[in-house]
Each structure stands twice: as structure tokens, then as C-alpha cells.
Image (cartoon, rainbow, N blue to C red):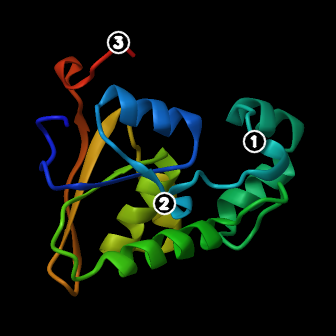
Amino acid sequence: MSARFNDRARCLRSPALAAQQTAEALRLPAESESDLRECDYGRWAGRSLETVQADDPVGMAQWLRDPASCPHGGESLLALLARVAAWLDGLRGQSDQIVAITHASVVRAAIVAALGSPPPAFWRIDIAPLSVTKLTCNGILWTLVAANERLRRSEFSSPI
């Protein structure tokens, strides 16, 4: 297991192949957790923001302005935030360290939930690829301890 994480840590990951491969590269025996899945972007999935903006500027503006909107036919920002907040709520009172390998959107949603921020705060959080965000919970409240800590190359078993 990576030296960064407690040997007794419970390791969870998104069902996505990229999360599985990241867990393997970190030598973390992570079990798949559906609540850590990427936001469902519907028909926008796999497309760059620039392409979506060019093809559906009205839908993009609506999606960015209204957290309940899902013009792409997938999951709204409110649905994503609710899913991740419910997952965090389920962890309250657990004493084990949880290592979650997931997507930037899920990490952003977790930070919004931890801080009790309004949904538009989601768009103002930048999460770097292959970074570590640390949240702690005293059994009642979540606290953001660190965000965007870079993983060191030495923490991986294979080049990525």
C-alpha cells in the first residue's frame, strides 16, 4: 500500500476503468463503490467542454446557471451533490481511514458537502488530476484539511 495511506485504510474506487488502474498503480486493494462514479453527463459524455459549448451553448449556459438542470439528459448538479453528500453522511462515525479514488466532479461535490457550501461553489473548485484531497470528520462535521496535494511518482508501482 502507498506510504501516504494508513495500512488499515479502507480503499474504495469509482467503477470506472481509470479509477481501477489508478488503484492498481498505487498498490491499493480498492473495492468498487457506485456512489463514487463520475457524474452522468448524458449525451455530453466523452466530449470536451469546448465542443459542448460550440454544439449546445444554450444547454451549457443553462447547466452552469441552474443546478437542477440537466440539458444533456444525464445527472443534474443537484443530483450529483446529493449522491456524494449521502455517501459522506454514511461515513460519519467511522474510525477507519477511507481512501477514495474517484473523479474531480465527485471530489468537488464532496468539498461542497463538507463545507456546507451552496451548489454554485462547485464551479469554483479546481481539482488537479492525480491529486489528494483530505477531509476529516469529528462524527458530526466534515472539515477540509487539504486539497490538490500532488502524488509523488514514488507512490506508484508503475509509470502513469
Relative to 123, residue 77 above or below = below
Mark 2 → mark 3, Cα distance in angstroms: 31 Å
Residue 10 found in image quarter: bottom left
Name the one closer to the observer, 60 or 114: 114
Q: Residue drawn 29% across and 31% down?
A: 26
Please name the residue that numbered disc 3 is placed on: 159
In terms of secondary structure, where does tag 1 sit? Answer: loop
Relative to 110, residue 16 above or below = above
Judged by depth in the image, the label closer to the viewer, 1 or 3, is 3
Looking at the image, can residue 129 be seen? Answer: no
Give the position of the N terminus as an image quadrant: top left
Give the position of the C terminus as an image quadrant: top left
Residue 69, image x, y percentages? 75, 68
Q: Are marks 2 and 3 in contact (CB under 8 Å)?
A: no
State the count of labels. Answer: 3
Relative to 45, residue 129 above or below = above
In terms of secondary structure, where does tag 3 sit? Answer: loop
Q: Residue drawn 46% across and 62% down?
A: 109
Amino acid under disc 3: Pro
Amino acid under disc 1: Ala
- Tell which circle, 2 or 3, labels the residue nearer the N-terminal end: 2
In terms of secondary structure, where does tag 2 sit? Answer: helix
Looking at the image, can residue 131 be seen? Answer: yes
Judged by depth in the image, the label closer to the viewer, 2 or 3, is 3
Please name the residue that numbered disc 2 is placed on: 122
Name the one closer to the observer, 140 or 160: 160
Residue 127, image x, y percentages? 39, 42
Please name the residue that numbered disc 1 is placed on: 45
Mark 2 → mark 1, Cα distance in angstroms: 19 Å
